[in-house]
Image (tube, grey):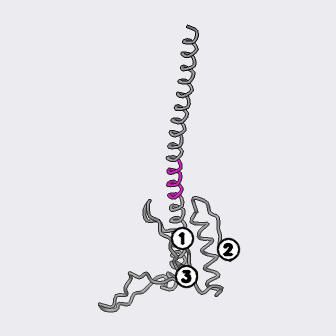
Amino acid sequence: IPEAQHVLGDKPSFEDVARIADHYMEDFAEGKWNKISVAYMRFETNARQIPEVIQLLPLAPEANQQEETTGSAANYEFSPSAGEILDDLLPRSVKTALFQMFNDSVVSENIMRMIAMKAATENANDLGKDLRRDYNRARQAQITTELTEIISGAAALE
């Protein structure tokens, strides 16, 4: 899919993500796709990010939602109509879900960068300590050799 890659940077705006969502919702409504799924990194904690694939369209009810069948059925009057409300809420739901996925991915990427940079800094500090110790040992050996030569030269002159 040529449109599969979008570059939004470190701070995706809701408007940019909404344009992407609009494009895919149009394609879905026109029948170009029968299902749209998004693969992303879901952020849980600094130490845990989980790769996930979520079906974006068609909207599916969440697994933990159960339809209540107890009680009496009540008729409600919607103003605007229930259809108009759904026509507004469903696209917002898709855009918001996609925006959350983008943000989770950005946070996960930044956390991994921070962890990598911390490890690189610690490795560089360790390397610096090792090099400083090696330099000091070589310098000490050179000074010892020079002192030995001076003492030997002075002893030879006596």
Question: Which residue is rendered at x = 54% and y = 56% of the image?
Answer: 113
Q: Amino acid at mark 1?
A: Tyr
Label drawn at residue 57? 3
Q: Identify the mark at residue 130; answer none if there is no mark.
A: none
Q: Which class describes the residues within 10 Å of circle 3: few (<14), some (14-19), or many (20+)?
A: some
Q: Identify the secondary structure beneath mark 1.
A: strand
First in residue order: circle 3 vs circle 2: 2
Separation (CA) of disc 1 from disc 2? 16 Å
**Residue 130 spot, x, y in % from top left:** 51, 40
Q: Residues within 10 Å of mark 2 (few under 14, many from 20)?
A: few
User: Above or below — where is 98 with respect to 32?
Assistant: above
Q: Main secondary structure of the magenta part?
A: helix
Residue at left 60%, top 74%?
A: 21
Dot 2: element: helix
Viewer-nearest residue: 54 or 92: 54
The quadrant where residue 38 appears: bottom right
Task: Identify the disc placed on residue 3.
Answer: 2
Magenta segment boundaries in residue numbering: 110-120
Q: Which is more N-terminal, label 2 or label 1? A: 2
Q: Which mark is residue 40?
A: 1
Secondary structure, mark 3, is strand
